[in-house]
Image (spheres, rainbow, N blue to C red):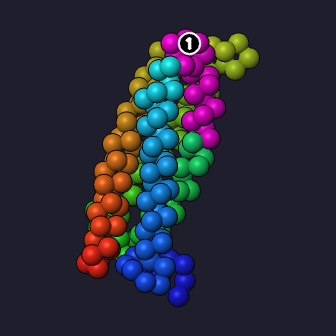
Amino acid sequence: MSYLEVPLSSGKGGRGVLVFSTIILVLLIGCLTFYAAIVVPAGTSVIGSTDQGFVTRLVTWRFNAIASPCWVALLLIHWKKGKLSLRYLLLTMIVIQAGLWYTYIYLDASMDLSRQEIVDSESFYTRHQWYLWLTTAQILIGWVLIWKFGQLLAEDSSGNL
């Protein structure tokens, strides 16, 4: 039996895969929510929005680099055994992640790192709005996924998976 063929129900390590997947999901979405809701506003109030943007540039690159393989792994793990809605939500997260990378690359190219300035501010802020909307979608869908994984864990506990 290969790694991806592990059943998601109790026995043969399936519950462990489900618990591990839930932990990864909670960490990803929890960290993203905390950063967006607490860290960015606090940083902006202390150092200003432009300087905070240059800090966020570094953080979001790292977060995207961590999140991207996690979304792919979660989709692969749950592709065969996961419910259809779960598969579509995970696939949506991959599409959103691709959109975040695309927008990030554009935003990064619009920043003059040596002078810490935005090169084309009008275009930059329009693209930045898209980045924020994609991040908001990722957070909201992420919380729906956490709820769905919680349902799966509850069903698995009752043996109805």
Quadrant housing residue 25: bottom left
The reply to whether the magenta stretch includes residue 41 is: no
For mark 1, does the 10 Å Cα neighbourhood hold few (<14), some (14 to 19), or many (20 or more) residues?
few
**Relative depth, front residue between 29 and 68:** 29
Q: Is residue 49 left or right of residue 140?
A: right
Tell how many labels: 1
Q: Which residue is mark 1?
A: 46
Residue 85 located left or right of residue 101: left
Q: Give the farthest residue toward the front.
A: 157
On the question of residue 17 being in view, the answer is yes
Residue at 55% over, 31% down:
106
Residue found at the very far right of the displayed protein: 114
Residue positioned 67% across, 18% down in the render: 112
On screen, residue 129 above or below 122: below
At x 46%, y 63%, the residue is 21
> Of helix, strand and loop, which one carries label 1?
helix
In the image, which residues are magenta? 43-62
Which residue is depicted at the point 50% across and 33% down?
A: 35
Magenta stretch, main secondary structure, is helix
Tell me the quadrant of the picture where the C terminus can be found.
bottom left
In the image, residue 44 lies at what x, y percent?
52, 16
Residue kind at label 1, given as amino acid type: Val
Question: Closest to the observer: 51 or 15?
Answer: 15
Please indicate, yes or no, whether residue 88 appears anywhere in the rendered image.
Answer: no
- Residue 51 image offset from top left, x and y in percent: 60, 16
Q: Position of residue 31 (x, y in %)?
A: 50, 41
Quadrant of res 133: top left
Confirm whether the magenta stretch covers residue 52: yes
* Of 28 and 12, the residue lying toward us: 12
35 up-or-down from 87: above or below: above
Q: Position of residue 3 (x, y in %)?
A: 54, 78
